[in-house]
Structures are given as structure tokens and as C-alpha cells.
Amino acid sequence: MKLILSAAVVTSLWLAPQTVTAFTPSALQSRSTFTSRVTQFSVGTSLASSKAIEETQPFLLERRPRPPYVPGKISDPDYVRIFDTTLRDGEQSPGATLTSSEKLDIARKLAQLGVDIIEAGFPIASPDDFNAVKQIADIVGNEVFDDGYVPVICGLSRANPKDIETAWNAVKGAKLPRVHTFIATSPIHMEAKLNKTPDEVVEIAVNAVKFAKSLGCNDIEFSPEDAGRSDPEFLYRILSEVIQAGATTLNIPDTTGWNMPWEFGELIKNLRENVQGAENVVFSTHCQNDLGLATANSLAGALNGARQLECTINGIGERAGNASLEEVVMALALKGATKFQGGPGTGKLYTAINSVYITPASKMVAEYTGMACQPHKAIVGANAFQHESGIHQDGMIKNKSTYEIMTPESIGLMRGDSQSGAGIVLGKHSGRNAVGTRLRELGYDLDADKLNAIFTRFKQVAERKKGGLEDDDLEALVSDQMGRSDILWEVTGLQVSTGISGIPTATVKMRGPDGMERFVASTGTGPVDAAYKAIDQIMGVSVVLESYQLNSVTEGIEALATTRVTIAPKAGGPNDTQSIHSQLGNRNLKFSGSGSDTDIMTSSARAYVSALNKLLNWNARRRAEVIAEEDKSGIGDAIAAEPMQVVEVEA
């Protein structure tokens, strides 16, 4: 695999220790000939130009070397490992169910980004989850970059032999496999959830680590769940014993987002000073965002000696989410060299993340999960590098450093000509090249098939929308098309009748998997309800519409509409996807979909069918796995005694 690195990262890391100013526009403007070539690459070319850069300026492709990977040890005490759990904790966000192909795409993007560890999933959850983790381990876990980097592939397990063995079987095909096991240690969890005494919890934890080691796994991460609310003395005891049993990484989760940064930092410091054998392991953080402090707590952990930080793209995850990878990484890129003295090493902390891939990774995760970032989200939000205030605009014109502490190019967001006053208008006469170029400038790294699908929708919309499509319109079309590789049903016709005195009626025509078109007319409380009931009848589904959001992408009567929906199968219905969650009990999986069009009814129908297609594909894979398992066991046509269950968990 080829090694690609943004010029902004090279400026900040290759010229260390000038990390503080290297991501700022003024730094890019004031440096020598080396920097001028860096600036040209950042602003004047897209990610697709990396091949030409490799031939003409190969030094730009040198990323900062990371210490050789050794379980439990980091030879440079200033290096911080980035552990990404987007595919495990992130996917547990309601409505964020991912297909196996989507997980593989995201894993490859994470490897391109350069994360040290990819937590690929929770293999015991279902056969589909096991296969997805195994696929990532076998493929991404063996794709070695030119500098020798290959990500560690990790599988999560509860502290019992069946979970651990399943996780190990899923990841052991990777060059660097890891098993991550956990058990709760706070009084409320031990008493109310586990119904175990502290002595029993210690015994379970030690046995779990020993069992993982007996399987041949020499990279074992242990997490005391809800450590943020656990008794420190009990943590000293259990962590000391799991180290002796063979644990190499100790992850300290603030599972409920309870801690303040100074409180969590002190916890990490005390653990490093009081846990026996602490010098033989790497301490890690896993911070939830219930109080909006996940990033702050993670950085407080790094300040006090944690050298692995667990995070997710866009900060997605259970409840309010996790520490955001892009926030953690860019904070260390800008402040790591000056504001982290006091822990081990020199205090000049750094990572080996290729930050130019932050924007593409963010957009991929947002589109695949259906979880859009709020406009004011730090680093990757739509407004993060936008300026409307007249005072701000004046400052930006004079010197971009007045209001931007980093360049958008440093995170892979190429502003392009439109941001400098010379942008082209994308309309019905625009060609595929113009659309593809603008998408690359916006951070979308699309293959030919996906670009063709988006371009087809672009031409359909551009024929009806006067004045051309703006960037937001184009991104809405990307959202409409991303993740549609497994289309079973497609809306081919839609007519709606509604009004004050009439009964809302919708006639829907759809093409099914067999290529045949079918149509149904239905009534409802409104036009959307009528259309959705007609779609339900054609597709033969029974679901609950959990959420429906309709937004105008831009202003004006001809604005493009984007619809996002979340559905859940009705319990006991033909599409039931009931699963077991370790903390929430029985629940149905949820599926999201999005659609865009100048017609709000068409947009609504496309979004709903997108979500239903995801549900039907998930159920089809699940049935196929059940049949395959029955064939292996020799059951044949017999009915299994117990229904298959899906298990989810939060560390």
C-alpha cells in the first residue's frame, strides 16, 4: 500500500518541534522553499494528486515514524497511541447499524488515517459481527504500508471464555491481533448489574486474562468498566492482579461521563503510582461525553501519563457519544509539544495520524451511519472553517491566522476555487469531471461506481433546479447515494393527492429484486404517511418510524430537500431484529436512511426505502448465517431449540 500524508502534517511533524504554529495559515505563509512547496500541495491539489507528488516530491510522503509496536510497551514515552472504536462503540449509537462492506470501507479509511489500533467490533454479538471483524482482521490487518505500519486489529469480549475465544478467533488472522476484555468494577455495577462480590469480580477478571493468554494472544487489553465511579483502592488491587495474569494495556473508562478533567487526570496519575507492575503496561483512556467532557478528560489522561487514547470518528457512540478522534488528534498536533509537561518523557506528545484524511473519514462515517455532524461541531462541522461576520471576514482577508488556528487543508478540507472567489457553478451542463473535482475538494474520496451514481442523481436534480447546485446541495446528493450498494427495492413512481377537504392518498410504484414493478395506492393521515403505508404494503414490512427529519439544504423555493429517517422493526413482526444489550436489555436494532430531491415527497420516499433496504439486507444475511450454521451442525431442516440472539455491549 502507498503512504500518503498531508503537507500540513509534514509541516507540523516532520519539522518538529514546531508543532504549535505549523497548522496555522501564518506558518504556511512564512516558511522557506520547503514550506512553499507544502502550501502548493495543500491548496492547489486534491488527494487524487498524491501519485504525482510521489514522483516529483517524495519527501512529502514521509510521515513521522512511530515507535515499533510492542504490546504493553512504547519505546518513546512521548508517543500517544490512537485507539479507534468507531466500528464497535460508535456502531452502538441508535440507528448507526453498518453493513459488513461499510465496516470494511471504514476500517481501510482508518488505516489510511494511521490509527494505531482499530477495535473492529464485538465478535460474539452475532455471526454477522464475527464475520465483519474477521474480514477486517484478515484484510486490513495484513495490509502493510511502505513504512512498515499495519494497524492492530482488536475484538471486544466480556470476561468469559466463550466471548474471549470468539474474539480471538475473529482477530487472530491479523498481523497484530488484540483481545480487549472487561468487567465492571464500580459498586453500583457490581451490586445491581453483576450481582457479584469484589472478590468474585477480581477472580473473573484474572481468569479472563489468563484464558486469553492460554489461547496464544500476547496482546491483551483489560478494562474495569465504570472505573470513573469505582473505588480507587479496588482498582489498584484488580489492575495489579490482571497485570500479573498477563494484561498488556489497562484501559480506564469513564463509562458514564461522570468525571471532571482534573478528577480523571488525577485518577490516571494515582493508578500509575499505585498499581503494581504499572511500568510494564500502557495506560489508556475511554471517555464518554455525557457532560461534554470526553475530549477534555482524554487529554487530562494524556497529561498524566496515559499513552493510549480511545476515541471515535465524529465522537459517535452510546448516548452522548465518545471522545472525538479529530478533536483529540488536532489538540495534540497543536498543543502536544508545549502543554503536556509533567508526565513521563519530555512532555512533547505526538501521534502518527495522517490528519489530511480526517475530513474524508468524517464524511464516510457520517454517510454510512446516517449520523450527520452538527454544523458547529469542532474540526469537522460545516461551519468550522466558515466566516460570516463582517469583522471576521475582514480579518480573514488580511491574515487567515486572525480567526483560524489551523488550516482546513491540514484536515483534508480543500476549500478550492469557490472559497477564494473563483468557484464554478455546477449546473445541468456540467460534466462528470467538474462534479468529481468539486467532490474531491470537499473531501470525498469516491470510487468510480459511487461517483457515477452521484453524477446520475446530480443530472436529474440539475435539470429541475435553476441557478446550479451549491456545495451543500452536492453533499446532500452524496448522502442520498452513499451506502446504496445493496439496493433491493427502488421507487420508480410516486403521485400524491392531499388537501384540506380531501383524504391524503399516495400511489407508489416500485421495482423489486426480481426486476418487476409493482404499485399500490394507500391513504393516510398525511401525504408522507400515505406514501409510507403504500411502500410497506409493496415491500411486505412491519416497522415503526422512530424519527423523521426534513431539512432544506439551501434557501429559496427551488432548494433541495434532505430527509433523514430512523426505523425499528415491530417486535414479533416479520422483520424482528431483536438483540440483547448488556445494559439496556432486549431491544430492536434501528436502521437509518436518507434521501434528497427538489420534491419533498420524493426525498421522503427515498429516505424511507433506503432504511428499509438496510433492514432487509441485514435480515437476509442473518437468515443465511443461521442456515449455514444449521448445515454445519447437521440439523438440516430441523428447527433450532433456541432462537439466535444478538448481543451488544458497551465498555
Image: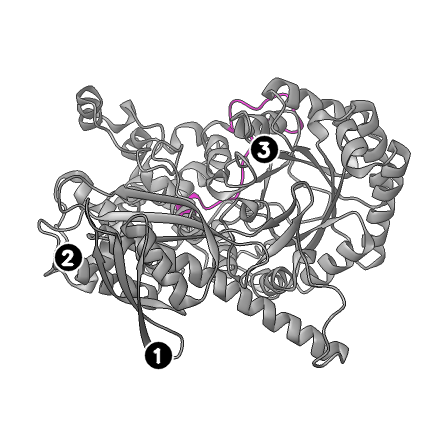
Q: Nearer the viewer, residue 456 or 391?
A: 456
Image position of 595 with respect to 553: above or below: below
Report the residue marked by disc 1.
515
Question: Residue at the spot x=51%, y=49% of the render?
Answer: 114
Q: Are marks 1 and 3 in contact (CB under 8 Å)?
A: no
Quadrant where the C terminus lies? top right
Instruction: Between residue 115 and residue 191, name the one nearer to us.
Output: 191
Residue 334 numbered tag? none
Q: How many marks?
A: 3
Q: Secondary structure at mark 2?
A: helix
The residue type indicated by label 1 comes to Gly
Q: Secondary structure at mark 3?
A: loop
Disc marking residue 288: 3
**Position of residue 471 in the picture relative to residue 315 (left or right):** left
Question: Picture coordinates of residue 29 (x, y %)?
Answer: 27, 33
Q: Residues within 10 Å of mark 3 (few under 14, many from 20)?
A: many
Q: Which residue lies under the disc numbered 2?
A: 462
Residue span colored magenta: 336-358
Asked if the residue at tag 1 contacts the one at tag 2, i.e. Cβ–Cβ closer than 8 Å, the answer is no
Mark closer to the chain start, 2 or 1: 2
Alpha-carbon span between mark 2 and mark 3: 42 Å
| Residue 341 within the magenta-colored segment of the rendering | yes
